[in-house]
Amino acid sequence: MSNTKSNAAAVFFFVGPSLAVIFVFFFLPVIAAFLMSFTDFDIYSLGNLSYMRFVGLKNYQKLFENPLFWTSLKNTLYFVVIGGPLSVAVSLSAALLLNSKLVKLKGLFRLTYFLPVVTTLVAVAIVWRFIYHPRFGLLNYMLSFIGVNPIDWLGDTRFSMPAIILMAVWKNFGYNMIIFIAGLQNIPEYLYEAAVMEGANDWKQFRYITLPMLAPTTLFISIITMIGYFQLFAEPYVMTQGGPLNSTMSIVLYMYQEGFRWWNMGYSTAIAFALFLIIFVVTMIQFRIQKETEE
Amino acid sequence: MKKAIIYSIVVIIAILSILPFVFMVSASLMKDGAASVYPPRLIPDGVTFEQYKSLFTRLNLSRYLLNSLIISVGVTFFSLFLNSMAGYAFAKHRFSAKKSLFKLLLSSMIIPGQVTMLPVFLMLKNMGMINTYFAIIIPGMASIFGIFLIRQFAYSIPDSLIEAAKIDGASEAKIYTSIILPLCKPILVTLGIFTFMGTWNDFLWPLIVMTDSSMYTMPVALANLMGEHTLDTELMMAGSVVTILPVLIVFLALQKYYIKGIMMGSVKG
């Protein structure tokens, strides 16, 4: 296109509506939430704004002193640190399998693996609740064949988070698998041919060609998976309500309960900002690690 | 040998992927209480549709289906227009703040949506839009991801096409409707499925803004039903089938576009 600037009216006409929506329903609320997190905005202020007072850092102080916040943070980290890498590993394995030249009917298998991704989370969480049923559940029945005694998956604090992780991996692995398959197909074939000629076995090819060539894809996947997993909500909401004994209470569930059940809205926005800060820091760390390993 | 091992793993993963759905469908076709047996059955003894019948007669499910449909179609329709306009301008128009503006949009994608929920809720409440379709449709009308997706695609449209239309005296609006939109059709379908399915499956936001039971979307209604009918396994499974079915149909019909969208969204994310 010519080097002159476009007609300002046209630009405004095309970009204006979207930016207006994003500004009013995203940027403005982010700023508002930040300000709210320094107030005691609660159910009384909801009726009359003059009841709202600035309280400085009190909400954040309360947050640091509240054991339930630390519990929810610990649970969320458990979910992210175990569930995230597990999801990525399963996605990569599935991608490698389906990318193998030995496998026929690739399209059909890919579609099958992908079905859990597109289905409604609330509905599958309900289905899995029954799969985890201690007496009649499918999982305990299958485990009984290898001699495992019935486990009260969602009622036992030791198993509740693993159960949620297992379901999340099942639900999500297909999405990243697709991205990995695209990444695998971008690796030039001659690299493998050269490796075979030099006598590299499957493992060596994977370790020295596939993994390094996939590094940018893996970084991207790790980051989106992590950001998504930090926002754990519907699974515990539907399956455990955060229980038993808060063992599946996540940060977003805690934020929801404080904000929309008890209407402690100032405090709730402080929780949301703590979540944002954590996601931000962890993402930066991941970028840094990636940069260092590249150098 | 190697082939046999690979195939058995591939098939086992496939079975594990669909087993929960098999259980869901078969339990939904059973009589009350018939799914709570040991060992669990994957094939119903006799098929009955009584669970589906009570969902639609006793439990008002058609209302929630309609709510979900109106909201999902509404968000999809408006967001396709707004995002495609902005995506096109970011790809093909020149304006001074373009680069920095786009960078700002992209980097703000790291902010989790939960941060904005309370202020947006309060804003909608003041406007009297809580418990209306607008509470979900209006904030969903534009998305940074959508603008990004369209922009990536619109880059590939040759400038010469737009130039030629300009020389012929076509207005900006005319160029958008008669050149850009038709050429962007594949990516519009992709974004449309993403938006429709994302809106249909969304839970937290509808849970917050739809507090009146007549305005529930399917996932919210289902989660609520779960509270009242914890022990009615067969009924809940039927509810899950009805919730999943519409998105599944959309996906199966247009899966090619959906898969392509995931791959595009991941390019230099």
Image: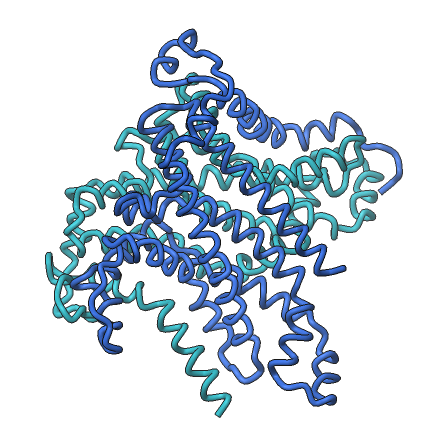
Chain colours: A blue, B cyan
User: Which quadrant: the C terminus of chain A?
Assistant: bottom right
Of residues B25 and B66, the one nearer the viewer is: B25
Q: Is residue B211 above or below residue A173?
A: above
User: Which quadrant: the N terminus of chain A?
Assistant: top right
Residue A228: where, in percent of width, then height?
Answer: 49, 48
Instruction: Locate residue B175 relative to residue A233 in the image: left or right.
Output: right
Q: Residue at x 40, y 62 (%)?
A: A170
Q: Is residue A124 visible?
A: yes
Instruction: Locate residue A182 relative to residue B45 in the image: left or right.
Output: right
Instruction: Locate residue A118 relative to residue B261 in the image: left or right.
Output: left
Q: Is residue B69 visible?
A: no
Q: Residue at x 65, y 79 (%)?
A: A205
Q: Residue furthest front?
A: A65
Of residues B131 and B178, the one nearer the viewer is: B131
Of residues A109 and B62, the one nearer the viewer is: A109
Residue A195: where, in percent of width, then height?
Answer: 72, 84
Q: Residue furthest bottom?
A: B1
Q: Is residue A156 above or below residue B99?
A: below
Q: Is residue B184 above or below residue B119?
A: below
Residue A119: where, in percent of width, then height?
Answer: 39, 55
Q: Residue furthest top?
A: A50
Of residues A61 and B41, the one nearer the viewer is: A61
Please state the total of marks drawn on the protein image: 0
Q: Residue at x 58, y 38 (%)?
A: B81
Residue A186: where, in percent of width, then height?
Answer: 68, 69
Q: Is residue B149 above or below residue B170?
A: below
